[in-house]
Image: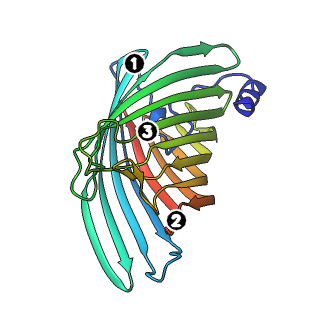
Amino acid sequence: MLVFITLFVASTNMAGFVSAAGISIDAGLTPAENRWIFRSQMRFMQRNNDPTPALREMKSYMLPVVVAYGIRSDLAIMIRQALRRNEIKMQGQSSSSTGLIDLLVLAKYRLLRLNTPGYTLGISPTLGLEIPSGADNFSSNSWDLHLGTFVSGRSRSWGIDLNASYVWNGMAKTGSADRDPGDEFSIESALAYQFGLGPNANFALAPVIEFSYLSISSDSKDGSTITNTGESVLLLSPGIKVTLSSIIFESLLQFPLWQKQLGQQTERAPSFLVGIRIMS
């Protein structure tokens, strides 16, 4: 937080950013009152380096669609639904499955916004609920509570975001026979610099760098920890955004800098995403 404030205050002369600096953080979407933001992405993730003789590998393709609406100038709501495809290889045998994941409904409230001639600063808590509506093998089968705080700063052509979130998975237990997924804690930060192009700056180019830390606790069943579940990961993610009027094209590469899996699990490999945002 100290680094964030130092970088934020060090710059002068605010520029008119219309979107969050980050690419992978849905909480950064902030539509104006009675305005919409539509976001769609294609995300590719993979896991390999199996420590067991099974030689397990997994590739995952996800197509999330997020719709955000500004109910008031200080309150926005967003809905996320995604289609996911998993391709798994084990001991030379391959299998695949496709289905919808659980639906997420998230509210974002503007708690603080400071506008000065040199900078702007915003702080917004978020509250979400993940509904167990996904297909078999793609649902956690639990009601999950999402709690978070999103901080954004703008100064001149610089933009910086900081998002901290906690996911309480399985907050409503549905029976002792059910598997309760581990809770998740994450911190995501993003720094971007926007180059305005054209006489009216309707076209802009913004390199982005993100740092993310994710900690997932072990799953449990009947109050007992399930082995070979849970992990911690630190990610470095360079990307770029291209803004053309009310449309943003975005792309991001994600590289694990450090990771620790609990038990004999596969490791995360480099991944990427490409997407589009439309503001109306």
Residue under the point 53% across and 60% down: 262
Q: Which amino acid does label 1 sit on?
A: Leu
- What x and y, as percent, mark residue 103? 28, 41
Earlier residue among tags 3 and 2: 3
- What x and y, as percent, mark residue 13? 71, 22
- What x and y, as percent, mark residue 276? 41, 46
Secondary structure category for the residue under label 3: strand
Mark toward the viewer: 3 or 2: 2
Earlier residue among tags 2 and 1: 1
**Residue under circle 1?**
75
Q: Is residue 179 above or below residue 72?
A: below
Q: What residue type is labelled 2?
A: Gly
* Quarter the N terminus occupies: top right
Earlier residue among tags 1 and 3: 1
Checking the image for residue 255, the label placed there is none
* Quarter the C terminus occupies: top left
